[in-house]
Every structure is written in structure tokens, then in C-alpha cells.
Amino acid sequence: MDRSFLFLIVVALSAVGGMTYPEEFRKLAMVLVIPIMPEVFPKSPEWIYFFAQVLIATSILLVSGVPAALYERLWEGERITNAPLLIWIGFAIVLSLPALKRLGFV
């Protein structure tokens, strides 16, 4: 399978997780996003909600990449495998499970 397609799966899982995460997590993200929101945007509820979704999606993308990066750094075998991307997809699925349950996939 193509590496760019596997990365696209990770990004899609992160985006879906950011958009459909349960409300209690989104409320926490809304509280956290208010101080770090760019000043260009108004502090309206719609923009806060949007940036909370972006924060959740970015967090899923970055946190799920840590085990893949550790594997890639510690593994001394062949460097042209898809194993790190598959690990990244696996952890993105795990972190997106609450959103996937809400959508009815799990």
C-alpha cells in the first residue's frame, strides 16, 4: 500500500475524531482553546467550537504519531517498511474510538 495513502488515513481519522468527539471532551478543549486562539478571529462561540475541533484533531494526529516515531527511532531493521505508518494508524484508531463509537462504527 502507498505510504501517502496510509498517511491520508491517519489524517482522516484525526479529522473525524476532532469533528465528532464526545461533548464532554469538546467542552474541555473549548476552555483550553480560548487563551491560544489567534486574535484575528472573534471570540464567538462558533469560532471557539471550530478551534476546539482543530485542537482535538491536531492532538490525535500528534499523540498517535509518538509510538510510531519511537518505533522508527528504536528499530534497527529495514527503513523502507510501512510498519511505522501502520502503528500510527492503530494508535489514531485507539484515540478516535470515542468519536467512532459516536458515529456507530464500533
Image (spheres, rainbow, N blue to C red):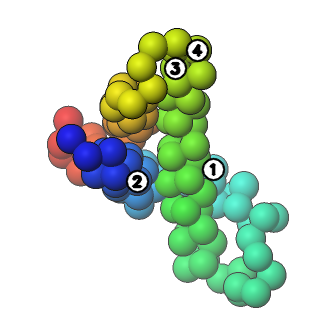
Numbered label attached to residue 47: none
Secondary structure of the residue carrying numbered label 2: helix
Distance between mark 2 and mark 4 Cα atoms: 24 Å
Of tags 1 and 3, the one toward the viewer is 3
**In the image, is 81 to the left or to the right of 52?**
left
The amino acid beneath tag 4 is Leu
Q: As displayed, is residue 41 above or below residue 86?
A: below
Mark 1, Cα crowd under 10 Å, few <14 / some 14-19 / many 20+, is few
Kindly state the secondary structure of the residue where label 4 is placed: helix
Residue under pointer 1:
28
The residue that label 3 is drawn on is 71
> Label 2, label 1: how many angstroms apart (C-alpha)?
22 Å
Which amino acid is tagged 3? Answer: Tyr
Q: Are marks 3 and 2 in contact (CB under 8 Å)?
A: no
Residue that mark 4 sits on: 74
Sequence-wise, the earlier of marks 2 and 4 is 2
